[in-house]
Image (cartoon, helix red, strand yellow):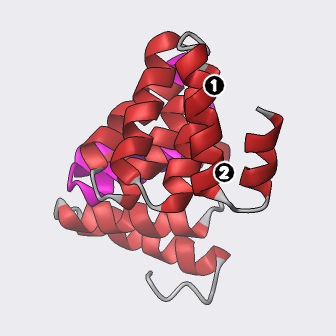
Amino acid sequence: LIRAEIYFDKKLYKDAINDYTKVLQMRPDYYSLFLYRAECYLEAGYQEEAISDLGKSIWSDIKDLYGFLRRARLYEKLKMYSFAADDYTEALRIYEQPDYYLFRAYAYLQNEMYGFAIKDYNIYLNYYPQHANALSNLGYCYLAVSDLYAAEINFRKAVKFSDNNFDA
């Protein structure tokens, strides 16, 4: 186990995967190792294997916040935004943190679920009202649903808080 961690730190991901796999063969109930091996798979470019291991980690502990967050990020990399949004929803059930609303809003935006994105961006902006990128993305959502007035308000706020915000 220690050797696997050393391999990971040295970015020798395939060696770390092999060591984690050996330990899991001896101790298949050592579910937290699935999370670590998933990290190695992700770094080594084995995305399907990473998703599988993250699923095993989450299955073992339905309150595995980091498993849900890591898998959501991986789904985003794979442009599987509806799955990412689902995992952010699970993360929010475990621990309500403002950034998770922002992450889920972005997943909804990418999946063209503008109503849900608008709701989550507004929740996030209640905590951080001067976040220019969130304001800009919210403006885009309103533009997509043809609410030009709300879009303009949010674009103007985005520029006010970040005058180099070219998206707004």
Type of residue at label 2?
Tyr
Residue 22 magenta: no
Name the element at disc 1.
helix
The label shown at residue 42 is none
On the image, numbered disc 2 is attached to which residue?
Answer: 128
Q: Nearer the viewer, residue 59 or 44?
A: 44
> In percent of the image, x 58 and y 69: which residue is there?
132
Which residues make up the magenta segment?
A: 92-116
The location of residue 105, given as percent across then percent down, is 40, 48
Circle 2 SS class = loop
User: Disc 1 marks which amino acid?
Assistant: Val
Q: Quadrant of residue 19?
A: top right
Residue sitting at x 73%, y 42%: 4
| Quadrant including the N terminus | top right
| Image vertical order of residue 107 relative to residue 65, above or below | below
* Residue 43 in sight here: yes
> Left or right: where does residue 11 sit relative to residue 125?
right
Quadrant placement of the C terminus: bottom left
The one of 158 and 102 positioned closer to us in this rendering: 102
Query: From what the image shows, is residue 34 above or below residue 9?
Result: above
- The residue tagged 1 is 23
Judge the density around disc 1: few (<14), some (14-19), many (≥20) Cα neighbours within 10 Å: some
Q: Which numbered disc flags the more N-terminal residue, 1 or 2? A: 1
Q: How many marks?
A: 2
Q: Quadrant of residue 35?
A: top right
Residue 24 spot, x, y in % from top left: 57, 23
- Residue 122 can be seen, yes or no: no
